[in-house]
Image (tube, rainbow, N blue to C red):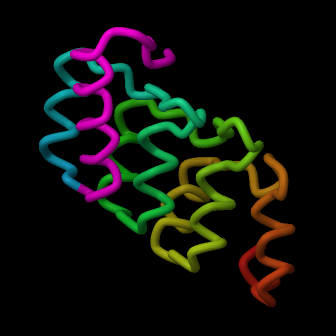
């Protein structure tokens, strides 16, 4: 589900939800998702809540979003996946959470495997 342009109240609310993911506010974000917020909500760049939590290194938030049905392989508008973002940021606990949930290390451009190779982290995959 994409954020609707042109509706300031909805855009402001969605921006707050993405900020919760970036900040790793797991329990507040859990409450919103359990109350009906789409777990795969995307921002204007195609980043999901999971992508933002993964990129910012919040493993507990990543695990919670996965538990509530987040798509671990959903790429953003640039073809990046949450797993590749976590590898790029060297967030190993997040990488483990995503891999344990079945994230495909070959998905996306560049893939998590390619990203690991770029940074000399071949042992990850």
* Residue located 62% across and 61% down the image: 85
Q: Give x and y (percent) for residue 4.
A: 43, 12
**Between 30 and 78, which is closer to the camera in this rendering?**
78
| Left-right relation of 51 to 61 | right
The boundaries of the magenta stretch are: 1-24
Q: Give x and y (percent) for residue 108.
A: 80, 47
Q: Is residue 94 above or below residue 22?
A: below
| Left-right relation of 76 to 32 | right
| Magenta span main SS | helix
**Between 19 and 75, which is closer to the camera in this rendering?**
19
Q: Give x and y (percent) for residue 81.
A: 67, 49
Q: Is residue 97 above or below residue 107?
A: below
* Residue located 25% across and 27% down the image: 12
Q: Is residue 70 above or below residue 11?
A: below
Residue 69 quadrant: top left
Residue 37 within the segment the image draws in magenta: no
Residue 59 quadrant: bottom left
* Residue located 34% across and 41% down the image: 18
Q: Is residue 100 above or below residue 95?
A: above
* Residue located 80% across and 90% down the image: 120
**Between 111 and 67, which is closer to the camera in this rendering?**
111
Q: Residue furthest bottom?
A: 120
Residue 6 within the segment the image draws in magenta: yes
Quick one: quadrant of the C terminus? bottom right
Count of all numbered marks drawn on residues in the image? 0
| Left-right relation of 26 to 89 | left
Q: Give x and y (percent) for residue 55.
A: 50, 61
């Amino acid at each position: 589900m994409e954020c609707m342009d042109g509706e300031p109240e909805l855009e402001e609310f969605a921006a707050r939800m993405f900020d919760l993911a970036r900040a790793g506010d797991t329990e507040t974000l859990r409450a919103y998702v359990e109350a009906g917020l789409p777990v795969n909500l995307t921002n204007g760049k195609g980043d999901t809540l999971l992508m933002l939590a993964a990129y910012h290194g919040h493993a507990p938030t990543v695990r919670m979003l996965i538990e509530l049905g987040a798509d671990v392989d959903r790429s953003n508008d640039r073809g990046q996946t949450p797993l590749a973002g976590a590898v790029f940021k060297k967030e190993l606990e997040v990488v483990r959470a995503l891999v344990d949930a079945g994230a495909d290390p070959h998905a996306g451009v560049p893939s998590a495997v390619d990203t690991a190779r770029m940074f000399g982290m071949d042992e990850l995959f």
